[in-house]
Image: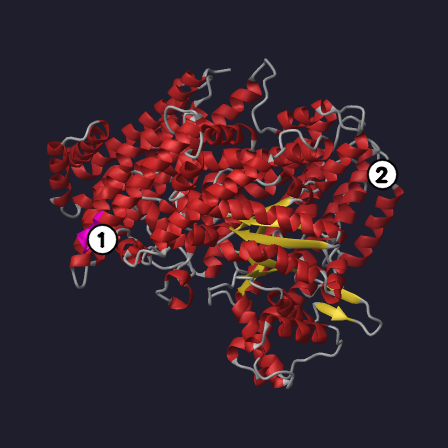
Amino acid sequence: MIEVNDANTLLRNDVKKLGNILGEILVHHGGVDLLNKVESIREKTKSLRQHHDQETYNALKEEIATLEPPTRQQVIRAFSIYFHLVNIAEQNHRIRRQRQYQLNEEGVSQPFSLERAVSAVKELQPEDAVMQKVLNDLSIELIITAHPTEATKRTVLETQKRISTILQEFDNQQLTKKERRRLEDSLFNEVTALWQTDELRHRKPTVLDEVKNGLHYFNQTLFEVIPEVHQELEVQLDEQFPNHKWSVPNFLHFGSWIGGDRDGNPNVTPEVTWETLKLQRRLVLKKYKESLVDLMKRFSQTTTRVQISDELLQSVEADEANYLEDGEEWPIETELYRRKFQVILKRIRAVGKEDKAAYQNAEELLADLNLIKESAEQHQPANRTLKTLRKLIRQVQLFGFHLATLDIRNHSGEHEAAITEILRAVQITDDYASLTEEEKLTILQDVLRDPRPLLLLKEDYSKETQEVIKVFDMIKQAHREFGSRSIEVYLVSMTQSSSDLLEVLLLAKEAGIYRLHADGTVDSGLHVAPLLETVDDLVAGPRIMKTLFEMDVYRNHLSERGNHQEIMLGYSDGSKDGGTLTANWKLFKAQQEIHDMAKDYQVRLKFFHGRGGSLGRGGGPLNRSILSQPAETLGDGVKITEQGEVLSSRYLLEDIAYRNLEQAASALLEASASSQIQTKKGHSRKEAWEEAMEEASKHSLKKYQSLVFGDQDFLTYFKQATPLNELGALNIGSRPMSRKGSQRFEDLRAIPWVFAWTQSRQMIPAWYAAGTGLSAFANESEENLALLREMYNNWPFFHSTINNLQMALMKADLKTAKEYMNLVEDQEIADRIFGDISEEYIRTKEILLKISESEELLDHSPNIQESVHRRNPYVDPLNFLQVDLISKMRAEENPSDELMTEVLLTISGVAAGLVNTG
């Protein structure tokens, strides 16, 4: 295997190669003067990082201030595009490292590979039945969302993918001079295209634009990669447990919020959701057709050479008679498999149309494919599986005719307003919204126990209530048209009480999704899931769910849903409300307490982790996210959001997509097996650890809230010392920045909150107040610091928390952040608040290094450490330029479009430089 230093040399060579090409392009488009200007600014910022010199600093400020269009825009773009190229090189290097492990002849498996995970489970010596139960319980759902602080256009992503493919080809040791020259020309042309492409969107994307962007990843990688992860697990089980035939369930699924998330987005209408479902079906049918055409070419066997099963023969004859017109039959009678595929293709093409040939559901397609498999296996060696056909069968099982399950989400206040109007119209109560919680629950249970409908004609209600009703009618229709898996979960944002969930169940009843029959039996076609977001809601979570679990109407609903309850945990608003340390601890505790309580009621819980891509919103690698959860909660599966800003970095390239999903699957397999087979292995938590976290959390919460809510000038500082107000012009999402256009802090969405702090390099949502909390506990005694070190070494939750804090501090940069103080109108406010942030930064860094027993931040992750060091000299110029441009723009009553464009280019460039941003 290539040594780490040699491997990093290959990465540096790639970065240098791409940088040289960019330099050549700069000379071509702007002359040597442009290249010299970029190099001059870079050298000065690099010098300032090594040693602050006032003369160099003044010269840099002067050089930036005197830049004029069009040179200024070219300088900004030069640094921004450099980051896109570095990102590509680093992703390519991940693929390179993965291949090095696979080529290694010494049998060293890659960390977080399925090979290593199965090997680790084997060491636990599980009984076959227990091992199969572990497999049966595996469940990962990843939900893509339209929170695109990933500001990169699809055109740019496609160019980046081509550059990555070329870089991979350069690693071929057998390249001839001619082939290498061709690759060099292609690489130059692609980087040139990147430079010549407008990277900014000139209009906000519509919801359907966002849907198509999400579907791009299914089309490019996920449709192929997800079944390959399942196949790899099958291979590893067969190789390492050869004496048993294992059944690997469909444990890895993707869903989506894009087109279904109505919370605060008036653009997500029932019509848009319906169109989303149609687009998803159209894509999955296209993929099936491509696979079927390929299989049809492969299955050329003839009945004169092989024995075909009687069941398949009878099926083909019946299908041809029922579904094919004269002349549509496959012309060679003895090629029975091709005759069957001809029918299948006809029936697939008819799906969604008024055609008797159309498959009514994916199960009918599966039955046909299994008929072919069972017949073909009769003339196939037992140790040689039909991988291509089996892959398609797995794909149909995974994706059905819906592709990805679409979650519907809306705010609890919307449901309450609709229920208030409905109950007033039928004279049950005049003002439901003003009732106590106990009174609400009494009324809702009474209505849910009554099989009679409540609704009058829809036109008798306000437009808002009609819209809420239409959503539930659409869900009912979607179940008929696209299958029950098309929409399975309805999420209730800002769940604060048990009535918030019963209101949704009542609306489902009126649409016929939930039905109470005269004999008392119940049908329920929709999971109702709370979203616990604020710190107070997380604390109240166990009480909210316990109240529901003790109600007969809700237990009847759960019984029809397999006694399965989904609960979503919001990382963004909790962190915004109480700071990252407190939020993460309250999230951990809420899971423990709700899980333990649900166990008493024989209810299986699936926690849905609403993590963002950024550290301030719970971001980080998928495998680390899984391991940081309470081990006892993983047995019923895990569900995690994949936010818009991480999609391209995780799922644009097939090898990276596979590796990302393999890491997640291996982490869950190992953690679940350890929990079930050997409960204490690696997951024991001491009571003293939890008490330590409780103590640190209290101090952290007090510190956080004293600044964010206690300082009357904080909001002024935030709005002026970050590019918050300028973010709205960056056309990156269909959803407004705040709920209902409000200027209140409470209504500001967590995404712009985090994004703005990240741009200014302060990044306080990701680390602020953690230092105070941890230091307060550690400083009480030497034993307390020793305890924190023990927690770091033995508790995955705490280990992940400390490492994420280190990453946040590493990406934050207060020397650069200090520049943003110049944007604050009142310098007294700027000095005071920035001074507090600076003191807390130093405090946090000191305690993190003590706990991890490190010399520098991220000593445990040298690759990431080097990546941050590599990027900083190029991010700094963009921050300096951003401050200068925002200052100019805010000074003008009507700033020019050109000035606004330049500000947005710096925002896009900083986002690319820091990678996980929003």
Give the answer, above or below, for where 733 lies relative to 341. Answer: below
Give the answer, above or below, for where 409 lies relative to 396. Answer: below
| Mark 1 closeness class: few <14, some 14–19, many ≥20 residues within 10 Å | some
713 left or right of 393? left
Residue 21 is situated, as x and y percent measured from the top left of the image, at: 29, 30
Which residue in the protein does label 2 denote?
A: 308
Give the mark count.
2
Task: Identify the disc placed on residue 332.
Answer: none
- Secondary element type, mark 1: helix
Mark 2 or mark 1, which is nearer to you? 1
Which residue in the protein does label 1 denote?
A: 829
Secondary structure mostly seen in the magenta stretch: helix
Look at the image and give the residue range highlighted in magenta.
Answer: 823-831
- Looking at the image, the residue that sits furthest to the right is 310
Residue 372 is situated, as x and y percent measured from the top left of the image, at: 79, 42
Q: Amino acid at mark 2?
A: Ile
